[in-house]
Amino acid sequence: MTQNTNVNKAVDFEKQKNKQEMKMQVVSFALMIVFTLVAFGAVATGAMQKIFIIPILLVMAIIQVAFQFYYFMHGKEDGHGIPMTLIYGGVWAALLTLGGLGVISWW
Amino acid sequence: MSYDPALFPEELPSEPEKATLEGQNKFMGLWFFLGGETVLFAALFGTYLALKNSTAGGPSSDELFGLELVFLMTMMLLTSSLTSVYAMYHMRNHDFKKMQLWLGITGLLGVGFLICEVYEFAHYITDYGFTFRSSAFGSAFYAIVGFHGGHVTFGICWLITLMVRNAKRGLNLYNAPKFNTFSLYWHFIDVIWVFVFTVVYLMGKVT
């Protein structure tokens, strides 16, 4: 009987933890929607100059991707050291690819 | 799969997707694959940026793109990312039926996204005569957006296979890692779309 209660407590604790995490994920989803709305709004109204709007759009995209990696894909949890190394390795190679293509196109 | 009693415990662990060595390997392998995919899409983005002004007298990105449809597609894909988070939430709570329900909604949103994309391409081809062959811009545009759409198509096929194959099995340590890897892949497709709508559509509209 005592043992059973312990098991239930452990399960409840897990459920509580999952719920807490779900809350964070819904918050990050709401923020992603806001960033998307701002990005589309900035372009649709044409209120900003090209030189300002492009860096802003890219920064908002990078923030959205960080939300995806760390909250939606659980990157901030324990045991994600190697996966994060792998994906950042990919990001690094991606930046080199973009840099290389940029240099041969516009240098 | 031969029947292995270790995969069907009476009480599932709290993270069933990482409870077996096979599950951990699948998880690690998928992240490795996503690292490679990042480079693949970077090459496509670099090509697109280099060629986007080579219109060969055809319509430019500013004349072609309509933000309304792209906004709708973005909302569908972004929401489908959240619904697959819900699916994984229910998986961790060992609720197979709710997980299947949310995965089903994810798939429907993905199909909605694809329908919009097909409509968009058809609109460009019939109303503007803008095809893969009309200019370097056309080739680069259809290559990158089409490659992303191809990934969505593959993801939907993957999801349907998973859901149908495991419909009567319920959740166990054998299939939990499979659902989890699908969900990671689906989030990654959304990551790519964030850059597609930013770099291709929004930056294409800024002149």
Image (cartoon, rainbow, N blue to C red):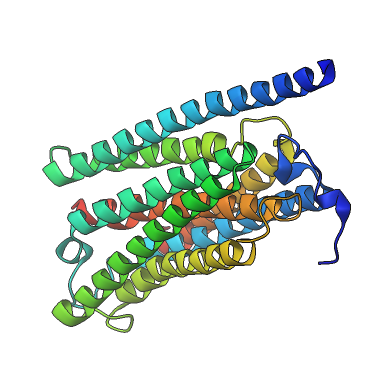
Question: In this picture, is B102 found above or below A36?
Answer: below
Q: Nearer the viewer, residue A61 or B113?
A: B113
Taking the image as shown, residue B20 lies to the left or right of residue B197, namely right
Where is the N terminus of chain A found, in terms of image quarters?
Answer: top right
Give the residue displayed 66% in from the left and 50% down from the top.
B31
Q: Nearer the viewer, residue A84 or B86?
A: B86
Q: x%, y% of residue A15?
A: 61, 27
Where is the C terminus of chain A found, in terms of image quarters?
Answer: bottom left
Give the residue displayed 66% in from the left and 40% down from the top.
A84
Most distant residue in the front direction: A1
Question: In this picture, is B131 found above or below B101?
Answer: below
Q: x%, y% of residue A10?
A: 73, 22
Give the residue displayed 71% in from the left and 30% down from the top.
A78
Please say whether residue B32 is visible from this viewpoint.
no
Give the residue displayed 51% in from the left and 49% down from the top.
B187
Q: Nearer the viewer, residue A88 or A40?
A: A40
Q: x%, y% of residue A16?
A: 59, 22
Q: Quadrant of residue B149?
A: bottom left
Taking the image as shown, residue A21 lies to the left or right of residue B201, namely right
Most distant residue in the top direction: A2
Taking the image as shown, residue A47 lies to the left or right of residue B21, namely left
